Image (tube, grey):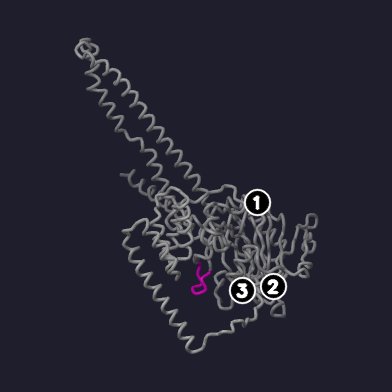
């Protein structure tokens, strides 16, 4: 009884441990760093599967040897049954085989060699990605397609810039992407990916998905976008493959009716205009072309253009005012003998980059500390003032305190020495790893006037400045962009960028609105320090001018 009472807490602890482990592995698609664990899980399962195959092959080999031996024996025995059994040893062995050895063979054939593999699979399945992960990864591909203007064939064939491990998509993969878009009523992407699936089928790729199914989705997606004539073409093609397809037959009649209705309406409109004399015969009037100003482009478009390396280019005059230098922060003792390399990235807002500011060893230590704690990154909800996850921020983050490792303390001291700002009131070092198509859409780091309670719980004022470490190189994509001013800062391992979010007056600098572009190829690790107002009174005196 005593043993039972002691055992219960142990099982409770084990259950809690499992639940914690499970919660730590939610939202795999939001962190490439944690997704790498899945590769090792899959490798372990493949090893287990091969062990099962070897066990099955060994069992079959034993059965085969037994069958071959008895085939030869019975062939000889049946030629002269009485003579064969006349030998007492043969008679004894026949009794033994039928009474014992055939029973042993039955046990061998019925033995289950799947136990090890199934047990391993069952244990590992609790750590597998969920439906949400698969959908999230699919939507990330669609996001990358839009941001970087990639056609479906480019993604399907794996021809992305700088890829080391090229991977092609099957018809099933393309079909799955189309279905996920369809479930969101995203008929634009449904068309793109169903058309790609059809293209690969037309090229002869073998698949469990048939053309009829793909054409059914494709024609409907095109119809939903208002292109009835094209929808009719694909529906007629579907009927040549399956003449008895009831929905397609009904759709053909409906599409033909709608097209006839449109034709009659167009004719009636043309006749009415002609009768009233409102047809404009002087179509030579040319409207003045408006100059395409970058400032007039919607923010979303500017954001995507900057992510692709397009958009506003700094004038040569402004460019000439940007410099690189050795920086010692007014002869700070840390930098007198070894000043840091400082490089101007942008003038307004003033953004600087520090080169070789964090070592590879420090980066690995930070990643090592952060990886077990990575959780889905959150944002401040302006309505509730609370932290919540959001589709426009796809990454995982962890917070590291200075007292848990000397490396973190040393990094904080370095930031303070370079910026001259107090770190005691700053937020802890936040480490972020971006997932599939990982991004953080345009946002402000500081709290605006309509968010008076944004950082109230911290009691340290607004975020005066941002320090951002790049802890990995990114093969393609992943830039930090400032849509309002047209600035783009590209990741470079071992560097950090710094900018002030507030003017010296304490007013927010709205030109610092920025975003993290989706990672197209590669793995992006960053860490940042948000520095607050409190404690900076003597380090950065208040300015008299609002925008000073």
Q: Mark 2 sits on what residue?
A: 537
Q: Specify whether residue 523 is in view.
A: yes
Quick one: SS at disc 2?
loop
Residue span colored magenta: 380-387
Q: Quadrant of residue 461?
A: bottom right
Q: Mark 1 sits on what residue?
A: 362
Q: Nearer the viewer, mark 2 or mark 3?
A: 3
> Could you tell me residue 36's position as x and y percent?
53, 49
Q: Nearer the viewer, residue 297 or 209?
A: 209
Q: Quadrant of residue 146?
A: bottom right
Q: Mark 3 sits on what residue?
A: 297
> How far apart in space, not on screen, are marks 2 and 3 (Cα)?
39 Å
Give me the residue at 33% from left, 27% from top: 63
Indicate which disc residue 31 carries: none
Tally of marks: 3
Instruction: Judge from the rendering whether residue 509 lies leftward or rightward of residue 266; answer left or right.
Output: right
Q: Crowding near pointer 2: few (<14 within 10 Å), some, many (20+)?
A: few
Q: Is 417 placed above or below 460 here?
A: above
Q: Nearer the viewer, mark 2 or mark 1?
A: 1
Quick one: SS at disc 3?
loop
Q: Specify whether residue 534 is in view.
A: no
Query: Is the stretch drawn in magenta largely helix, strand or loop?
Result: loop
> How far apart in space, not on screen, are marks 2 and 1 (Cα)?
31 Å
> Could you tell me residue 389's position as x and y percent?
49, 65
Q: Crowding near pointer 1: few (<14 within 10 Å), some, many (20+)?
A: some
Instruction: Judge from the rendering whether residue 350 lies leftward or rightward of residue 195; answer left or right.
Output: right
């Amino acid at each position: 009884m005593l043993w039972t009472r002691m055992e219960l807490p142990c099982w409770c602890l084990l259950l809690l441990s499992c639940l914690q482990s499970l919660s730590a592995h939610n939202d795999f698609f939001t962190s490439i760093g944690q997704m790498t664990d899945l590769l090792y899980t899959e490798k372990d399962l493949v090893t287990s599967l091969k062990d099962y195959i070897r066990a099955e092959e060994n069992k079959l080999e034993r059965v085969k040897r037994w069958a071959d031996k008895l085939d030869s024996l019975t062939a000889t025995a049946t030629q002269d049954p009485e003579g064969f059994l006349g030998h007492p040893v043969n008679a004894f062995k026949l009794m033994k085989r039928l009474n014992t050895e055939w029973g042993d063979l039955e046990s061998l054939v019925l033995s289950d060699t799947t136990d090890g593999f199934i047990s391993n699979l069952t244990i590992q399945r609790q750590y597998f990605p969920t439906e949400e992960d698969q959908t999230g990864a699919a939507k990330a591909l669609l996001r990358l397609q839009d941001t970087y203007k990639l056609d479906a064939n480019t993604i399907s064939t794996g021809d992305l810039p700088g890829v080391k491990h090229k991977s092609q998509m099957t018809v099933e993969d393309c079909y799955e992407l189309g279905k996920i878009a369809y479930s969101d009523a995203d008929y634009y992407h449904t068309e793109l990916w169903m058309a790609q699936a059809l293209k690969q089928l037309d090229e002869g790729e073998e698949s469990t998905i048939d053309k009829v199914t793909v054409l059914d989705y494709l024609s409907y997606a095109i119809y939903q976008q208002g292109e009835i004539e094209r929808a009719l073409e694909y529906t007629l093609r579907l009927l040549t493959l399956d003449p008895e397809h009831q929905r397609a037959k009904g759709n053909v009649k409906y599409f033909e009716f709608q097209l006839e209705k449109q034709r009659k309406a167009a004719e009636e409109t043309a006749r009415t205009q002609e009768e009233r004399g409102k047809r404009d015969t002087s179509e030579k009037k040319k409207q003045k072309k408006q100059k395409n100003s970058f400032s007039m482009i919607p923010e979303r478009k500017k954001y995507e253009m900057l992510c692709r390396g397009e958009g506003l280019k700094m004038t040569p005059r402004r460019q000439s005012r940007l410099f690189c230098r050795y920086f010692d922060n007014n002869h700070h003792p840390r930098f007198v003998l070894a000043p840091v390399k400082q490089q101007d990235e942008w003038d307004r807002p003033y953004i600087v980059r520090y080169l070789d500011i964090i070592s590879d060893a420090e980066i690995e230590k930070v990643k090592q500390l952060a990886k077990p704690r990575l959780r889905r990154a959150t944002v401040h909800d302006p309505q509730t003032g609370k932290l919540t996850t959001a589709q426009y921020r796809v990454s995982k983050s962890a917070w590291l305190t200075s007292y848990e490792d000397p490396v973190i303390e040393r990094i904080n001291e370095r930031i303070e020495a370079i910026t001259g700002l107090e770190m005691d009131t700053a937020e802890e070092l936040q480490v972020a790893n971006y997932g599939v198509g990982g991004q953080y859409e345009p946002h402000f780091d500081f709290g605006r006037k309509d968010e008076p309670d944004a950082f109230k719980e911290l009691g340290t004022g607004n975020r005066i400045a941002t320090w951002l470490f790049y802890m990995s190189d990114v093969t393609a994509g992943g830039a930090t962009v400032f849509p309002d001013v047209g600035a783009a800062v590209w990741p470079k391992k071992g560097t950090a960028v710094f900018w002030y979010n507030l003017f010296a007056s304490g007013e927010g600098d709205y030109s610092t609105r920025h975003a993290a572009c989706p990672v197209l190829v590669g793995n992006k690790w960053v860490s940042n320090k948000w520095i607050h107002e409190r404690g900076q009174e003597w380090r950065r005196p208040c300015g008299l001018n609002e925008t000073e």
